[in-house]
Amino acid sequence: MAIAATLPDIPANAPQHCPGTESELAGKADACKGCANQEICASQKPTGPDPAIPLIRERMQDVKRKILILSGKGGVGKSTFTAQLAWAFASDDTTQTGVLDLDICGPSIPTILGLLNEQVHSSASGWSPVYAQPNLAAISVGFMLPSARDAVMWRGPKKNGLISQFLKDVDWGHIDYMLVDTPPGTSDEHLSVVQYLKESGIDGAILITTPQEVALQDVRREIDFCRKVGIRIIGLVENMSGFVCPNCKNESQIFKPTTGGAKRLAEDMDVELLGSVPLDPRIGKSADFGVSFLDEYPDSPATTAYLDIIERIREILGDT
């Protein structure tokens, strides 16, 4: 499915950086100059509440849990954690799990779930997500790119349009856990998903960090974001908290927590520390090959940490 065909608010004859006909900048942005639709777009009056909201609410009626996976800093293992959490939930054949990849400019979920080169198909009931196994589905802009090397260079309105379509047009069916993988920061994608899911309800957010202060600084901002927009914080996970030797299973610190790490941050910000996942080089290998690390290496201390964290998430949500 071509990306250009997925956004109805972008006219077929629009310039490259069209903000979209539903944007407040429609007909006013620099990209609109010289466009045949400029006068029409500029003359449109505000249309009131976003018409996508009731459609999204209807779609989300069959989704039991909606969980955001957030990280203020890039490269802390957020998408990897999202995938492992999805694999863990889906290990129960009766649990339907979905992964919504909102990292539009850096979609890695297709690779991590072993779905690279798959495509989205449409039917009368909407877009069909791509399945890693019968009870684990995913949707990502990565399924819509001509190749994995193609860059996505979009401004906010166009991202907003795609997120809206992911939520209202994807035919998920019944889902027990929907995990929303977000990009780093607190910007367009985060604000859009909070706005669109406000009426449907977000069950909470899991924040991912590493021990270094440079990562913890951004997580503090992420915590502030959650509190300002009213998202419940399920807890904090510290990734790369140590290095596990695949042979002897001993653990040593690579990234030393010079300011106390996630434990100190959780205490200072009154957030629960769900657990710490040590570095295991096989986690990266599993992500590259699109397989479940938990299934491939059940004896790793990292697997034990993942499972303990996942069990605690279930307890907090009341699903045990």
Image (cartoon, rainbow, N blue to C red):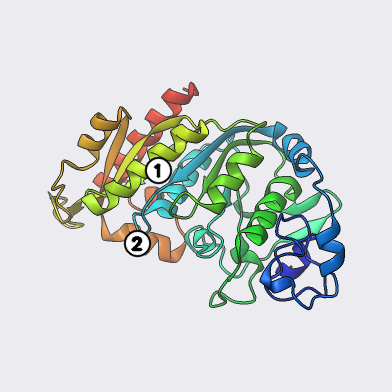
Q: Position of residue 69 (x, y in %)?
A: 46, 44
Three-letter amino acid code at disc 1?
Glu
The reply, left or right, for residue 319 in relation to residue 235 is right
Residue 62: image x %, image y %? 70, 33
Q: Is residue 160 above or below residue 151?
A: above
Does the image show residue 159?
yes
Observer-nearest residue: 181 or 112? 181
- Classify 10 Å Cα crowding around label 2: few (below 14), some (14-19), many (20 and above): some
Viewed as shown, does residue 303 lie left or right of 31? left
Comparing marks 2 and 1, which lies closer to the viewer? Answer: 1
Question: Do residues under tags 2 and 1 come within 8 Å of each other at their CB atoms?
Answer: no
* Residue underneath mark 1: 222
How far across and down, in percent of the image, does residue 4 sit? 74, 69
- Residue drawn at 62 percent across, 62 percent down: 141
Q: CA distance from mark 2 to mark 1?
A: 25 Å
Label for residue 289? Answer: none
State the residue in front, 21 or 256.
21
Residue type, mark 2 in image: Gly
Image height of 311 relative to 304, above or below? above
Q: Quadrant of residue 247?
A: bottom left
Is residue 179 shown above or below 77? Answer: above
Circle 2 sits in a helix, a strand or a loop, which is it? helix
The residue where tag 2 is placed is 284
For residue 236, side relative to residue 199 (left or right): left
- Say which residue appears at 44% left-offset and 32% top-offset: 227
